[in-house]
Image (spheres, helix red, strand yellow):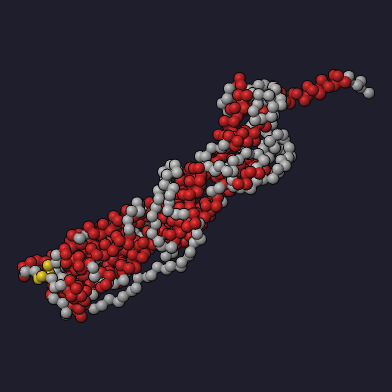
Amino acid sequence: MPPRAPPALLLLLLAAASAEPRARSCSEVKRLYVAKGFSQSEAPSHEINGDHLKVCSPSYTCCSQEMEEKYSQQSRHDFRNAVVELSSNLQATFSSRYNKFDEFFKELLENAEKSLNDMFVRTYGLLYMQNSEMFKDLFVELKKYYTDGNVNLEEMLNDFWARLLERMFRLVNPQYHFSDEYLECVSKYTEQLKPFGDVPRKLKLQVTRAFVAARTFAQGLAAARDVIARVSTVNPTPQGAQALLKMMYCPYCHGFVAVKPCYNYCFNVMRGCLANQGELDTEWNNFIDSMLMVAERLEGPFNIESVMDPIDVKISDAIMNMQENSMQVSQKVFQGCGQPKMLSQSRASRSISESSFSARFRPYNPEERPTTAAGTSLDRLVTDVKEKLKQAKKFWSSLPGNICNDDKMAAGNVNEEECWNGSDKSRYIFAVTANGLANQANNPEVEVDTLKPNVMIRQQIVNLRIMTSKMKNAYNGNDVDFIDISDDASGEGSGSGCGLQQCSQEFVFNATEVVQDSKKSDKELDASATSMSLSESALLVSIFSFLAVQRQWR
């Protein structure tokens, strides 16, 4: 039987054995500290008294005062990176989809303008080119509405049809002289006589709904992008910074370099540090829901692609209606505005000659006519973005859990006894605090002032409410006056005219359907030609020839 060791010697051996791993741990702490770019001289090689520590345990420690300060900075940096990493992915999603939608809408307008111009140049030639500025103005105003919003679509379209009536009235009555005052009188009869049939009313309804929905949806994508960019840069409070240091690097001071924070412990720290961001969740989800509803409108009755692609045909339909009813329209205008003066014989002949043209319309082949823009279609764009919107719901309430799901941040739920609980390597005993600012009064890890919300985040909540209200208006086909929320949130411009009660109203979903353009059979020209003068017949036969061919092709 071996001799029994003296008690004093045994105690010394036990003390040395227990001290050796701790000394190795401090060496590993020092190595990792230097690897982060910090000074080697600040890190002790063995345990020292921890009375100098402000946050971590003041027992024997591997951390100097300088190390605790540097670890505090590093924990804030790690926290910001974790938030930004998750937020930047979502921000990039909204940014890329906004850019694609914006490119698509702008190119769609360019294609529609080019299509109309090409068709009318081939058909009307010089006569169209002499009057092309009013059609160019139409597209200028449509583009201006999409980019700036400072256009009353209804008034703009009414003005377009009034100008077109004035030009057409001169063309169908080339033997008369019309003063500006007389033409103003003519325009007053637009609503009463409906010289263009029902096309202006239908087109106004379709254009207004489609443009409002398209512009609002694009603005919504941009607003989401900007909200994420601002909220993701919010720094932790001093109390939050202390909790982050305690969770992330205080275990290093105990020598636990390989021990990760307990999952629920991490969850509580992140819930406390992201308490204000959690307040966004309700308004964010309402905003996402409203975006999804407008997306459905874009797929259906408010599809801007289905409105703009055939807009040249619709305007031509209106011209045909004017031609078909020119005699009745002229007679009623003459009755209301007075009989205009006849031109002299030579001037009348010259006017008739200048007004006449021959139809040279050659229809496009299907592959010639642009039917998409930016290499895609609206349906494909909307389908893609709807999926991304659904994934973005509950982003802010899920953010703390998503951060802690990273194995660099927490141990996970499987190692509940082998994780850092804030004071030692052991099970974490506290329950997870609920989401939101008010619930953080019960947070055991982070002291949160629940009566002092973050001002910048409150501004973003207001911005989301504003955009949700805009989406509701767009969904119902109502025009939208935009408030710019793209500048830095400073509290300015928060008076949106959208009170909290108004902004929080439920959607009223009216199943509004786009009225389809009615199809009219072509009339024979001979019956109308016999009742017209020779000059009128020459003009109208050529127009009718073009429109008849056009209708068959369409």
Rendered residue at 33%/53% (across/down)? 150
Closer to the camera in the image, 511 or 123: 511
Residue 410 visible, this angle: no
Rendered residue at 15%/72% (across/down)? 338
Task: Name the image quarter holding the C terminus.
Answer: bottom left
| Left or right: 223 as drawn, with respect to 43 | left
Closer to the camera in the image, 43 or 332: 332
Closer to the camera in the image, 322 or 317: 322
Where residue 135 sits: x, y (%)?
Answer: 25, 59
Q: Determine the image quadrant of residue 265.
A: top right
Closer to the camera in the image, 394 or 319: 394
Q: Determine the image quadrant of residue 416.
A: top right
| Left or right: 505 as drawn, with respect to 24 | left
Where residue 162 sits: x, y (%)?
Answer: 24, 65
Number of callouts? 0
| Left or right: 398 as drawn, with respect to 477 | right
Rendered residue at 51%/46% (across/down)? 458
Where residue 125 sits: x, y (%)?
Answer: 19, 62
Residue 277 visible, this angle: yes
View extreme (right): residue: 1
Rendered residue at 24%/70% (across/down)? 189
User: Compared with residue 89, is residue 528 higher up or lower down, i.e. above or below?
Assistant: below
Where residue 27 sits: x, y (%)?
Answer: 67, 24
Task: Name the image quarter holding the N terminus.
Answer: top right
